[in-house]
């Protein structure tokens, strides 16, 4: 990967980290009676299932779309792809408990692979 692409990924990962902290604070305010670690686990699972795969899928359109546009479209796209693929993989016979681990890893790695091939 070229250096400018790596620097851009590093800058945008800081934005995603800040967004994670903001969501953590918002969720802790909403669920104030829950333990901090339960709220942390809930926010991380939302980011793991929807934000990280969606962001990595949309890296391919890095030149054409802004960070916020890619993030919003990526979250919706990730939710759709994970939902549909989870349904069909479940019909094939893979147990549902593995979907939350395998599908985000597959989407993240394919998004980064396509981004590295483009650059």
Image (tube, rainbow, N blue to C red):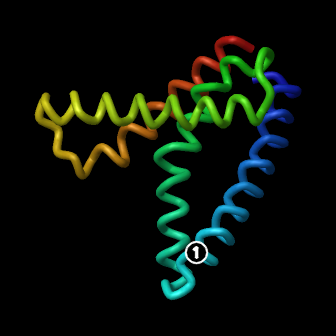
The percent position of residue 25, horizontal first and vertical second, equals 68, 71
Q: Which residue is at the front of the view, 51 or 10? A: 51
Residue name at image x 69 percent, y 11 percent: 118
The picture quadrant where one finds residue 113 is top right
Q: What element carries label 1?
A: helix
Q: Which residue is drawn at 67% across and 58% down?
A: 20
Quadrant housing the C terminus: top right
Query: 54 or 30, which is in the foreground?
Result: 30
> Horizontal placement of 102 versus 93: left or right?
right
Q: Which residue is painted at 77% across and 57% down in the image?
A: 18
Query: Quick one: 3 or 48, which is closer to the camera?
Result: 48
Quick one: which residue is furthest to the top in this view? 118
* Percent position of residue 85, x then y: 31, 29
* Number of numbered tags placed on the structure image: 1
Residue 26: x and y, percent?
66, 69
10 Å neighbourhood of mark 1: few (<14), some, or many (≥20)? few
- Above or below residue 97? Residue 65 is above
Residue 28 in which image quadrant: bottom right
Measured along the vertical axis of the image, is residue 61 above or below residue 46? above
Please tell me which residue is depicted at 79% across the width and 48% down the height of the picture.
Answer: 15
Residue that label 1 marks: 30
Specify the quadrant that holds the N terminus.
Answer: top right
**Residue 111 rendering spot, x and y as whole percentages:** 57, 26
**Which residue is most to the front?**
30
Apparent side of residue 106 relative to residue 94 in the rendered image (left or right) = right
Describe residue 93's horizontal placement relative to residue 27 as left or right: left
Q: Is residue 2 left or right of residue 84?
A: right
């Amino acid at each position: 990967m070229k250096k400018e692409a790596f620097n851009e990924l590093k800058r945008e990962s800081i934005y995603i980290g800040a967004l994670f902290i903001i969501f953590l604070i918002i969720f802790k305010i909403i669920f104030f009676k829950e333990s901090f670690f339960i709220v942390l686990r809930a926010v991380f699972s939302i980011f793991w299932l929807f934000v990280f795969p969606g962001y990595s899928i949309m890296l391919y359109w890095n030149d054409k779309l802004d960070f916020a546009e890619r993030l919003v479209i990526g979250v919706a796209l990730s939710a759709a792809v994970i939902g549909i693929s989870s349904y069909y993989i479940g019909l094939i016979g893979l147990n549902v408990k593995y979907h939350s681990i395998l599908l985000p890893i597959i989407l993240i790695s394919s998004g980064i692979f396509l981004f590295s091939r483009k650059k």
